[in-house]
């Protein structure tokens, strides 16, 4: 079923990770990515891996959900690994082979890097509701307002898009069921037949998406929405002690990776 | 003869995730050919999930659904074939209209059945006739019609497949009284002329009292009551208990009885109320 897509889905919970300010989590993810891409030796990789596993354990996200989210990425991960195995210069593992020891090492590291990158960002979206995420993003990007970047409008668009993904998925599901009940067949036939079979889904979906957009615009205007200026929020974000602790830990972690890089670990 | 028998049907949504939810639990029921059935229940009682099992749109987590003794989930082909025998009209079916003209949209189902052109045309005309869609509308775009007309075109799209069992999920939701009545009359008309089994999911007790022979009441994913309107409406309190109501006529009758007006027999339709009142009037005037 379409509903079972896990990519970037929020799992409600009440752990320390869930309760952190979304801004803290966003900064931590940026630090995490910087650290990940500066990890060179095995020691640094092990450190990043260990930190990721600890974060996963603390946030109580079931590993099964992580693997489910990783599934669509498997192809990319495998392809990167393959390319690295075959296109790295070095000492061949056997006389006359293209595969080198260096290639294998780099492939493993690349696989690890991509997997950790995905898992790390998953932890953010799994533990933060989309609304909190866009709120945090808006506040973090606020300084860009001075450069005439329409931050409020952009984040509003983002949160609306996120808000309507489940609605549209549900709607698609419903329309698909209705057309299936009328004998529509989406699973057999060649490529052209299948593409044609999508028409009975797409037309009603677009019609209803535009209707929804229209209704939403009217509803917002009738509640006097007129842009971000002077707007207050219902849930004020506030940094607490745990946020400072988390940020300090994140900074220490990133610094450690850089130190390890310097010493070639 | 299409007899649908449901045995120990259980359905769990999103099994194995934190959002896991059992919509229906251990439901067993038999529907015989030609019956007119209303399925009642408050929002989230599992009635919509239940009807989607009857034409294999949803597969049971546990239990079986048989039509004439054959498991409809046996394989892909039986799952496809059952959709032709059991027609399902979803809630707000007008949102599924997509073709350029009304006639083409009604023809979508028969076309998927790979029928001949003449056969398709005949069925479109017949189905449109059942729901009162005039032929002058055939070349219009379904998106420019009024709400009630759209709804009728969408229902015609399912009737055009000539299902032996016609299921409608809240066919009158969001329509004005005249629109609702027309649709209910159209459905009755189809049942009488084709001999199909008709199953309507609804909240409307007055419609239930007027249009059906059998009532099935869902509550928290299982069948709470199953019987004739007389039997079910006799349990006013139990109905209130599951978040439903009794028909207006039954409510008035109960209030009158409370004030000492002697009404005889079961009263849950307007006609019955009128008759009972007349009889009560004769008794007191002599």
Image: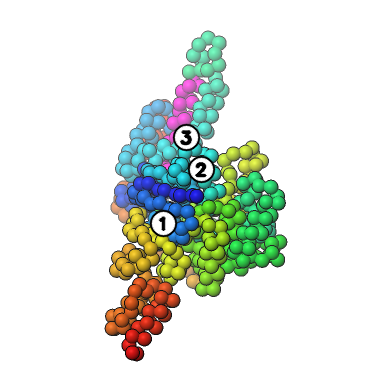
Tell me the residue at 52%/33% (across/down).
Answer: A76
Q: Chain of mark 2?
A: B
Camera-side mark, 1 or 3? 1
- Boundaries of the magenta span: A102-122
Q: Is residue A249 left or right of residue B68?
A: left
For the residues marked 1 and 3, what is the alpha-carbon distance in whole angstroms? 45 Å
Quarter residue B262 falls in: bottom left
**Residue B54 point in image, percent of width and height:** 46, 50
Would you say residue A117 sits in the magenta stretch? yes
Where the C terminus of chain A falls, by quadrant?
A: top left
Tell me the residue at 30%/48% (across/down).
Answer: A15
Q: Chain of mark 1?
A: B
Q: Are marks 1 and 3 on the same chain?
A: no
Q: Which residue is mark 2?
A: B79
Q: Which residue is mark 3?
A: A114
* Secondary structure type for disc 1: helix
Residue lying farthest top?
A95
* Secondary structure type for disc 2: helix
Tell me the residue at 40%/48% (across/down).
Answer: B6
Q: Which residue is mark 1?
A: B47
């Amino acid at each position: 079923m379409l509903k079972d897509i896990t990519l970037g889905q929020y799992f409600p919970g009440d752990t320390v990770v869930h309760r952190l300010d979304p801004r803290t989590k966003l900064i931590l993810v940026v630090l995490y990515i910087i650290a990940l891409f500066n990890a060179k030796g095995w020691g640094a990789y092990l450190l990043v891996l260990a930190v990721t596993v600890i974060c996963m354990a603390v946030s109580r996200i079931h590993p099964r959900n992580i693997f489910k989210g990783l599934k669509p990425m498997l192809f990319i991960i495998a392809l990167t690994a393959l390319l690295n195995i075959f296109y790295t210069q070095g000492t061949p593992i056997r006389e006359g082979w293209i595969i080198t020891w260096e290639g294998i090492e780099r492939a493993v590291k690349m696989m690890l890097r991509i997997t950790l990158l995905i898992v790390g960002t998953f932890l953010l979206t799994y533990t933060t509701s989309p609304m909190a995420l866009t709120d945090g993003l808006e506040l973090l990007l606020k300084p860009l307002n001075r450069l005439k970047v329409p931050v409020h409008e952009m984040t509003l668009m983002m949160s609306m898009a996120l808000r309507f993904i489940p609605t549209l998925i549900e709607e698609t599901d419903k329309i698909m069921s209705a057309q299936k009940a009328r004998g529509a067949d989406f699973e057999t036939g060649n490529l052209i037949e299948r593409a044609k079979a999508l028409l009975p889904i797409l037309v009603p979906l677009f019609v209803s998406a535009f209707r929804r957009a229209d209704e939403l615009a009217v509803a917002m205007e009738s509640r006097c929405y007129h842009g971000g200026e002077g707007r207050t929020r219902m849930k004020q974000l506030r940094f607490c002690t745990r946020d400072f602790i988390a940020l300090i830990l994140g900074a220490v972690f990133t610094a450690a990776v850089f130190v390890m890089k310097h010493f070639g670990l | 003869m299409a007899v649908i028998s449901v045995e120990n049907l259980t359905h769990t949504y999103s099994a194995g995730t934190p959002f896991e939810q059992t919509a229906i639990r251990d439901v067993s029921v038999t529907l015989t050919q030609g019956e007119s059935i209303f399925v009642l229940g408050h929002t989230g009682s599992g009635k919509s999930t239940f009807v989607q099992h009857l034409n294999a749109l949803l597969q049971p987590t546990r239990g079986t659904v048989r039509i004439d003794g054959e498991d409809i989930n046996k394989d892909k082909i039986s799952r496809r074939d059952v959709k032709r025998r059991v027609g399902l009209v979803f809630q707000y079916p007008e949102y599924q209209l997509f073709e350029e003209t009304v006639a083409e949209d009604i023809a979508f189902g028969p076309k998927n059945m790979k029928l001949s052109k003449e056969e398709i045309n005949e069925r479109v005309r017949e189905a449109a006739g059942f729901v009162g869609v005039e032929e002058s509308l055939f070349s219009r775009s379904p998106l420019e019609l009024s709400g009630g007309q759209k709804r009728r075109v969408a229902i015609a799209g399912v009737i055009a497949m000539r299902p032996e069992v016609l299921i409608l999920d809240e066919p009158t939701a969001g329509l004005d009284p005249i629109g609702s009545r027309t649709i209910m009359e159209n459905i009755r008309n189809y049942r009488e002329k084709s001999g199909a089994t008709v199953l309507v999911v609804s909240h409307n007790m007055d419609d239930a009292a007027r249009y059906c022979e059998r009532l099935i009441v869902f509550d928290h994913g299982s069948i709470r009551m199953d019987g004739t309107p007389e039997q079910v409406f006799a349990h006013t309190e139990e109905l209130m208990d599951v978040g439903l109501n009794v028909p207006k006529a039954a409510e008035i009758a109960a209030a009158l009885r409370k004030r000492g007006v002697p009404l005889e027999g079961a009263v849950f339709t307007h006609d019955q109320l009128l008759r009972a009142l007349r009889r009560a009037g004769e008794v007191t005037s002599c």
